[in-house]
Image (spheres, helix red, strand yellow):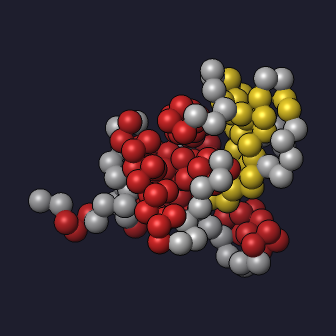
């Protein structure tokens, strides 16, 4: 068995480690660049520097994580685990970890007629925003988080993920 793919990149505001834990991600060789670009864009706009670890995984693994940490025994698209401790890495504070499930991203992007990379970028941004304390438990929180996600993604040239596709001209 080969070691999982790892990429580490440091920008002025964010350090990102990406681990492809599942072989399914080999079908998407640019996935790490999409995730990195999305999180860097979010960090620049939000202004919260630090480090983030991202695990690109599969539905089986994320289902286990979802059951263990949230008590929900089904796969999901993205999970965020904000750091409970602010332990320092060289020049950065670890903000937390993000897991993204390949099969769910594939299914959702197909069902919503979205490009896989665009949906992946949205999930990376969504996960990062959870790490920095944003949530969508109330309607007001959801609107605020969705507006920020849309603004970040727009800066990457990605359409509003919350727009109703049936309302297009």
Asked which quadrant contains residue 113, the reply is bottom left
Q: From the top left corner, tell me how far across and down residue 86 is, in percent.
A: 84, 41
Query: Considering the image in quadrants, where does the N terminus appear?
Result: top right
Query: Considering the image in quadrants, where does the C terminus appear?
Result: bottom left
Residue found at x 71% / y 63%: 62
- Residue placed furthest toward the left: 169
Along the line of sight, which residue is nearer the eye, 167 or 34?
Answer: 167
Residue found at x 78% / y 39%: 94
31 over 122 or under it: above or below: above
Asked which quadrant contains residue 81, the reply is bottom right
Along the line of sight, which residue is nearer the eye, 25 or 143?
Answer: 143
Residue found at x 74% / y 52%: 82
66 over 56 or under it: above or below: below
Q: From the top left corner, tell me how far across and down residue 144 is, in percent.
A: 46, 58
Do we see residue 163 in this rendering? Answer: yes
The answer to whether residue 37 is left or right of residue 91 is left
Along the line of sight, which residue is nearer the eye, 30 or 118?
Answer: 118
Q: From the top left corner, tell me how far across and down residue 118 is, in percent.
A: 43, 47
């Amino acid at each position: 068995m080969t070691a999982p793919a790892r990429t580490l990149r440091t920008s002025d505001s964010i350090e990102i480690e990406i681990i492809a834990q599942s072989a399914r991600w080999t079908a998407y060789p640019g996935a790490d660049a999409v995730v990195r670009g999305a999180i860097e864009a979010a960090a620049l706009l939000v202004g919260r520097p630090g480090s983030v670890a991202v695990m690109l995984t599969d539905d089986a693994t994320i289902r286990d994580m979802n059951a263990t940490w949230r008590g929900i025994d089904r796969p999901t698209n993205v999970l965020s685990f904000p750091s409970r401790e602010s332990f320092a890495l060289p020049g950065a504070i670890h903000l937390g970890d993000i897991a993204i499930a390949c099969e769910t991203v594939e299914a959702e992007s197909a069902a919503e007629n979205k490009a896989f990379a665009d949906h992946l970028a949205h999930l990376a941004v969504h996960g990062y925003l959870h790490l920095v304390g944003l949530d969508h438990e109330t309607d007001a929180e959801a609107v605020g988080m969705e507006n920020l996600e849309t603004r970040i993604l727009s800066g990457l040239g990605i359409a509003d993920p919350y727009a109703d596709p049936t309302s297009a001209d």
